Amino acid sequence: MNTENKETKFQSLEKEEWQVRKDLAAAYRLVAHFGWDDLVFTHLSARVPGPEHHFLINPYGLLFHEITASSLVKVDQDGNIVQSGSVHRINPAGFTIHSAVHMGRPEAGAVMHLHAPDGVAVSAHRDGLLPLSQTAMLCLDHLSYHEFEGVALNLDERERLIRDLGSSNMMLLRNHGTLTVGRSVAEAFTYMYFLMKACEIQVRAQACGPVHMPPESAIETTRQQSQDLGRAAKLTWPALLRLLDSKYPGYAV
């Protein structure tokens, strides 16, 4: 490859990385908008285009509504910081969880992990996510579970987490929170929206008293109809970016 072609390829990768940075910063702002954030804790990550196996994650210490494309920290799969903005540190538990998924699922373009109360509540429920709503039924075939092992600081947990995740794009981390995986930031966020909405509905329904369970035939039909759930991102993500641009400009710098 001649010098000109190398420069063109490098510029292309830089452009692709900047787009991923903007999308990931947008996702952080959207998590804050929907009230799913937890001060400076929890984390969203995205794979950096290119052969280096780097990914982007939040700088540890910024609130989600403060995060911008340029403030995101680039790390390698061993947790070494490759590039950072003003804050030169990451959440160790965030590295454990996200490195596990990025290493175990090569197609994973983005990973999101939250501690939002309704998601934690359902993760702590004996029966997990129940088919109490259309939204929940759309999630069931995409969902897996991982047992709580303590704060995710033990790198040995990565093997068990990726084993439990399997090919699923949604996970309830028992007594801990929610996790989603997508080929892109937009897809991972869309999966998280459906999972969080299902959890919110379940918490409200169970607070009202005895619940009505739909017929098994309806549950099965809806499961079959959920196979293309990730494709909803093509409609939802542009609309969500318009929301950010109108209400919370500044994330894409």
Image (cartoon, rainbow, N blue to C red):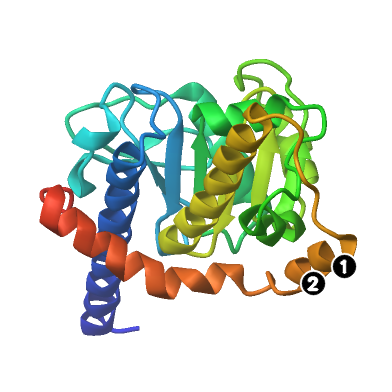
Q: Which mark is residue 221?
A: 2
Res. 137 image quadrant: bottom right
- On the picture, is 117 further left or further right than 132? left
Position of residue 78 relative to residue 121, above or below, is: below
Q: Nearer the viewer, residue 3 or 185?
A: 185
- On the picture, is 87 further left or further right than 115? left
Query: Which residue is painted at 68% across and 38% down in the image?
Result: 172
- Asked whether the residues under the numbered discs 1 and 2 touch, taking CB atoms below 8 Å apart as contact, a structural biologist would say yes
Picture coordinates of residue 17, whole percent (x, y): 30, 61
Measure how far apart labels 1 and 2 are at the Cα level. 6 Å
Which residue is under mark 1?
Answer: 217
Q: Nearer the viewer, residue 51 or 1?
A: 51
Say which element carries label 2.
helix
Q: Nearer the viewer, residue 99 or 247?
A: 247
Picture coordinates of residue 214, whole percent (x, y): 80, 56
Query: Which residue is painted at 29% across and 67% down in the image?
Result: 239
Farthest residue, direction right: 216
Res 192 seen here: yes
Res. 40 image quadrant: top left
Position of residue 102 relative to residue 43, above or below, is: below
Say which element carries label 1.
helix
- On the picture, is 185 further left or further right than 243? right
* Image quadrant containing the N terminus: bottom left
Q: Amino acid at mark 1?
A: Ser
